[in-house]
Amino acid sequence: SLNHPGIPKYYDFFVEGGKKYLAMELVHGQDLEKRISFTGPVIPKQAIAWMIQTCDILDYLHTQNPPLIHRDIKPANILVRREGRLLLTDFGLVKVVSEGQSANSRLTGVGAPLGTPDYMAPEQVMGGEIDARADLYSLGIILYQMVTGTVPFKANLPMQVAMQHMQVPPPSPRALRRELPLAAEQV
């Protein structure tokens, strides 16, 4: 029932042979993760344009009645169409925040973190109460990755990455890419 130019059209959901399928529109383009890995860091002007588009999509989700929280905002879930417009995909972890229901009620049980550790907000790591701010935190990590070409935290185990989000300030973007303007560092 979502109707936004930044959200693909979903046509059907079905189960066959014990597997669940979701039929959606065919999108020509590539995901933002592949785009960054092939081309490296994005110029700040392009990063700003993509952030504006993504913020518009998230604002749409977060202002639904009831609000929707994506919970898995990451470059692999953002498709870049051939003409440059973005689409947010993979609504498998979306949380509908209904009146009288806490945002930490989970598909896998209370207290179980859901998402991708490289992009998870600290409250997601802890399995705590989440709201729209968790999606915005993830978007901040994507912005960091767009302008530096890498995520701020790396480790051998996913949980180590998740813990760094809670305990370690991210490295300075300008330390990784000296030509970035000071304004990009401040964001």
Image (cartoon, rainbow, N blue to C red):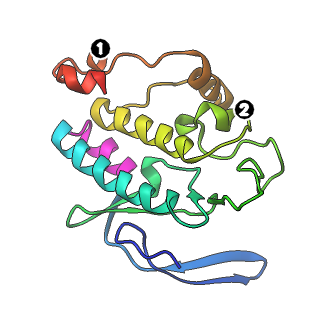
Q: Residues within 10 Å of mark 1 (few under 14, many from 20)?
A: few
Between 139 and 178, the one lying in front of the other is 139
In the image: residue 129, left or right of residue 86: right
What secondary structure predominates along the stretch shown in magenta? helix
Q: Does 109 appear above or below 119?
A: below
Q: Where on the picture, by quarter, is residue 90?
A: bottom right
- Which residue lies most toward the front here? 99
In the rendered view, would you say 62 is above or below 51?
below
Type of amino acid under label 2? Met
Separation of disc 2 and disc 1 at Cα? 29 Å
Image point (19%, 46%), residue name: 46
Looking at the image, is 9 positioned above or below residue 72?
below
> N-terminal of the two: label 2 or label 1?
2
* Location of residue 127 in the rendering, given as x and y in whole percent from the top left corner: 74, 38
Which residues lie in the magenta part? 32-42
Residue 56 in the image, given as x and y percentages of width and height: 35, 57
Which residue is drawn at the image coordinates 40% and 78% (left, top)?
26
Q: Is residue 166 left or right of residue 56?
A: right
Residue 148 located left or right of residue 171: left
- Residue 11 image point, x, y percent: 52, 85
The residue tagged 2 is: 126
- Crowd tier of the residue under label 2, counting other residues whose Cα lies within 10 Å: few below 14, some 14–19, many 20 or above: some
**Label 1, on which residue?**
175
Amino acid type, residue under disc 1 in the picture: Ala
Residue sitting nearer the eye, 56 or 141: 56
